[in-house]
Image (spheres, grey):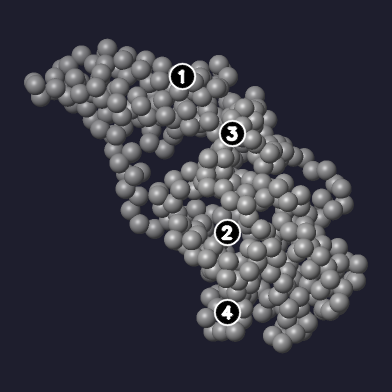
Amino acid sequence: MKRECLTIIGTAHVSEESVNEVKDAIYEQHPDVVAIELDRNRYHRLKQEMMGIEQDDSISVTDIIKENKVGLFFTSTLLGYFQSKIGAEVDVAPGSEMIGAIEASEDLGIPIALIDRDVNVTLQRALNKMGFIEKMKFLYGLIASVLGFGDEEDVDIEELKNPDNLDDLMEMFKDEAPNVHEVLVHERDAYLAGSIMMLPQDHVIAVVGAGHKPGIERYLDNPETLPNLRSLEVIDDKKGIPWLKIFLAMIPILFIVIFFLAYFNGINIAWNIYDFIVISMIMGFIGSILSGSKIQSAIVGGLVAPLTIIHPLLAAGWFSGLCEAKFRKVRQRDIKNLAHIESFRDLWENNIFRILLVVIGTNLGVSLATLVILPSKVFIPLFMKIFGM
């Protein structure tokens, strides 16, 4: 790639003007290659959409939970919701400018280069770097946007391509979620720039989001600052001491210790164990049923609650959620329909929201039992008997 022969087009992903700008540039310049901000999976999805191929839009919530990809799934759903929401407002489907680039390139017989990092790698790296506070802000952002009680302003999509506006937007994003900003912005700037530099063709048109254009140009002007691209594809486990997990794990251990101490001190714990099981099951059932689950899901949540309290790596909500997923099939249209939600009733009818609500509701019920009811009704009385208080 020759730097002087490179044209970088910064686009708004839901802009009709961006579509026309991309097509016009390709037809006018007739480059050797068109580089687009897509990974292989997203490219294939767009191609199938262009050819009118209907995909199986079912989503296996069971696999998502079993493979521990719940956070990844809901993060991608959140980002998809934001783009779909804006796209619906301006009547332009997300990714239209990429489709325009593909159509123009194929029309002229120009090869296409996919220069973006796999989206799952990007999202997983972001999740791994997010602290508890950032995750809570992210969750709040989703709820606020879906229910419409966040700050709303009329946004000119084309104005978002203005470098000054982008700098302000990126700086605000950096202040709110610095770790996410690092992965979604700086890392991808570097990855996109590195991918462009490795293209063997001389004359290149690169179609990227406007927010990435300044960062890409900085790396291209200072190639010595570019990190190794392979290092940006590694999914590292979070570093540091997981204090919250340690605290949560200590609770069931403490419960077991109290039971054993009581038993070895000759205290009859049969009724305490009975109370533990019954209270746990009732709270798991209530939490699930109040969140709108099927009766079968609530029964499952209740039955597994005692075991999940003792086992720190299990959560009753996942079991009730898996059961609920059997009754509520989640499809891609449930994600797309998030953009058209205008009331709580619309949200209530969305299967993604309903399953997530069942998971959260069951876990809240069991957590209430673990942190409040069981200590006051079972473990504190046992503790006092052990030490003769």
Q: At numbered mark 2, what does the secondary structure look like: helix, strand or loop?
A: helix
User: Would you name the residue on which mark 3 appears?
Assistant: 353
On screen, residue 40 above or below 269 = below
User: Would you name the residue on which mark 4 appears?
Assistant: 218
Q: Are marks 4 and 3 in contact (CB under 8 Å)?
A: no
**Which numbered tag is attached to residue 285?**
1
Q: At numbered mark 1, what does the secondary structure look like: helix, strand or loop?
A: helix
Report, in whole angstroms, how far the alpha carbon at label 3 lies from the one at label 2. 24 Å
On screen, residue 270 above or below 252 = above
Residue in the foreground of this view, choosing between 74 and 82 = 82
Question: Badge 1, how many Cα within 10 Å: few under 14, some, many 20+?
Answer: many
Q: Amino acid at mark 3?
A: Phe
The x, y position of residue 83, in whole percent, is 66, 51
Question: Badge 3, how many Cα within 10 Å: few under 14, some, many 20+?
Answer: some
What residue is shown at x 51% (from left), y 19% (from top)? 289
The mark nearer the N terminus, 2 or 4, is 2
